[in-house]
Amino acid sequence: WRSRTDICVEVEEELRFHLDMRIDALMAEGHSRFHAEELAHREFGDLNSTRRVLGRTDRAAEGSRRRRQTRDEWLRDIRFAVRALRRSPSFSVLGVSTLGVGIGLATLVFSVLNGVLLRPLVYPDAHRLVTLWQFDAAKAAREKPAPANFLDWRERSRSFEQLAAAVPYGFDLLGEGDPVGLSAFQITAGCPQFRD
C-alpha cells in the first residue's frame, strides 16, 4: 500500500515527466531552453492546484483499492474458515462452544467489575466518602483501626464532617423456605445517612 508521501512523490514525478516532455517538444520546434520552459509552465497553468487535485484523486483511488483488497482478504479468510470447519464438525462444535463460554465469562467479569468498581456508589455525595486505616510499621501492613483509635479520631477530627466505624456482619433471614444468608455492616451511632 502506498503512503501519503509515496503518492505525493509519484504525482510530482508524473508532473515533472509531462513538463519535461513538453519542454523537449518546444525545443524541437526551435525554442531556446529558457523560452521553452517558460512556455511549458504557462501552458500547464497552476501546478500547485494540479498537484492538489491529482493528489486528492490518487489518495481516493488508493483508499478504494485498500478497502476492496481488505474486503477480498476477509471474504477469502471466511471462505477458508467455513471449509475448514465443515471438514471437522467436532472441532467446530468445540471451537464454537469454547468461544461461547469465553464470551460469557468475559461478560460476567465485566458485569461484576462494572457493578463493583466502575459505577458510582449509591450514597449521596459518594465522592466525599473515604476509608481510614491504621498502619503498623512493624508489620509494614495496614490494618483495621483499634476501637480506641477510632474514638480518638472522631473526637479530634477537624477534616471530616462525621466519622463512622463499620464492621462486617452477617445474619440469616428466616421465613418461608430455606434461610437466606445476608451480608451487612454494623455502623456506629451518629450517622443518620446510614440508618435506612
Image (cartoon, rainbow, N blue to C red):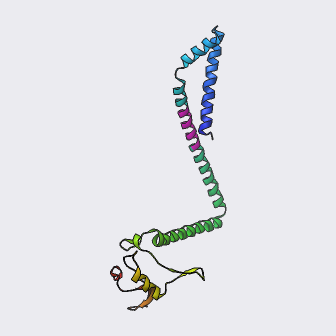
**Principal secondary structure, stretch drawn in magenta:** helix
Which quadrant does the N terminus fall into?
Answer: top right
Which region of the structure is painted magenta?
A: 55-66
The x and y percentages for residue 15 are 60, 25
Residue 99 is drawn in which quadrant? bottom right
Q: As displayed, is residue 90 above or below residue 164?
A: above
Nearest the viewer among 42 and 81 is 42
| Left or right for 75, reference 180 | right
Residue occupying image coordinates x 61% and y 28%: 12
- Residue 20 shows up from this direction: yes
Q: Is residue 123 magenta?
A: no
The x and y percentages for residue 125 are 37, 71
The x and y percentages for residue 94 are 62, 68
Residue occupying image coordinates x 57% and y 68%: 102
Which quadrant does the C terminus fall into?
Answer: bottom left
Residue occupying image coordinates x 60% and y 50%: 74
Residue occupying image coordinates x 61% and y 16%: 37
